Amino acid sequence: MSVIHTENVNTLGRSLCIITGASKGFGRTLTHQVVYLLKPRSVLLLVARSGILLQELRMELQSFCEEQQLLIQCITADLSTKDGVNETVTVARQQAVNEPDHVLLINNAGSLGEISSFVNFTDPGMVSSYMAFNVSSALALTAGILQAFPSSPALRWTVVNVSSLYALEASSSWVLYCTAKAARKMMFKVLAEDEPNVKVLSYSPGPMDTEMQEEIRRITGVSHHLFPCKESAAKLMKLLLENDFPSGEHIDFFEVQS
Ligand code: NDP
């Protein structure tokens, strides 16, 4: 059963916050916003394959973090691999000594995959490799972090699944992306059932101006009206601060008031 718990505070507490896909696009913008909501002695773990971009991001935030006693750690990892997931869990586990009040895991990393007619997907290996990153790694990472920081009534625990409208709606030629987003939505609903002390949110961030959208434009030739990442990130921060969504809920950018 879903639990509604209203906080109405302007901080996320002394947190261990993990953001996957933090090097670019939405994840990078989320990092820029979440950092202002963390209490001193929080730790922010940023995960992506591009170590250089992560280090640049860390440098951008360094003086603020020093002032606020926040620690940022970059994890250069490929989350499509077992090693990448394990390394992220290992680094997170090392943060247990900081005894966070809140564990916040934002499963943001994702990829577009091939956009093509259904009949072209005859290679099971190619499909599995897409699902390994976009579905399996989010499950394995979330499970690993939950083992490292077991949920309890005394610990605030939040998991965000960065979702999409395509988790709910079918779109021609988008079989990989729609299937993965739909699977993730169900996966995180099951988590909400399994773990009553974990607040789970599937957030569909709306059409945003990122490299992923550039790729969509290039492949399909279609351009959409796009919103800046910061608008969508601000709505996600609002949802997290208010914390009154039922666990397991799927909420769209257009449903959240600015
Ligand atoms: P981008 O392609 O701009 O960024 C994707 C991020 O994921 C990058 O930081 C990338 O870092 C990381 N990433 C990709 N592959 C891996 C990997 N194997 N291991 C670790 N990290 C990886 O995407 P967006 O910012 O646009 O999208 C972010 C999320 O929002 C995705 O889940 C997407 O599906 C969702 N979304 C986006 C929308 C949009 O309009 N942009 C609309 C709806 C949902 P690196 O390359 O350094 O590894």
Image: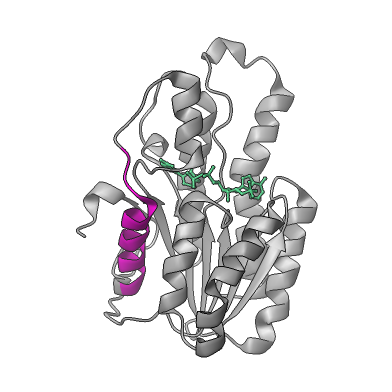
- Which is nearer the eye, 236 or 222? 222
Residue 23 placement: quadrant: bottom right
Measured from the top left, where is residue 232 in percent x and y? 34, 54
Measured from the top left, where is residue 145 in percent x and y? 64, 67
Is residue 181 found left or right of 140 in the rendered image? left
Q: Is residue 41 above or below residue 237?
A: below
- Which is nearer the eye, 94 or 45? 45
Q: Residue at x 68, y 72 (%)?
A: 92
Q: Residue at x 50, y 88 (%)?
A: 68
Tell me if residue 85 can be seen. Answer: yes
Measured from the top left, where is residue 16 in percent x and y? 56, 76
Q: In the rendered view, how is the structure colored?
A: one colour
Q: Among all residues in the image, which is located at the extreme top?
A: 119
Task: Give the magenta part as a residue range.
Answer: 226-241
Tell me if residue 192 can be seen. Answer: no
Is residue 163 found left or right of 116 in the rendered image? left
Q: Is residue 111 above or below residue 45?
A: above
Q: Residue at x 51, y 89 (%)?
A: 67
Residue 223 placement: quadrant: top left
Instruction: Indicate the quadrant containing the N terminus: top left, top right, bottom left or bottom right.
Output: bottom left
Main secondary-structure element of the magenta-colored stretch: helix
Q: Residue at x 54, y 51 (%)?
A: 24
Q: Is residue 186 above or below residue 112?
A: below
Magenta-colored stretch includes residue 238? yes
Magenta-colored stretch includes residue 19? no
Measured from the top left, where is residue 122 in percent x and y? 66, 14
Instruction: Indicate the quadrant containing the C terminus: top left, top right, bottom left or bottom right.
Output: bottom left
Q: Among all residues in the image, which is located at the extreme right?
A: 83
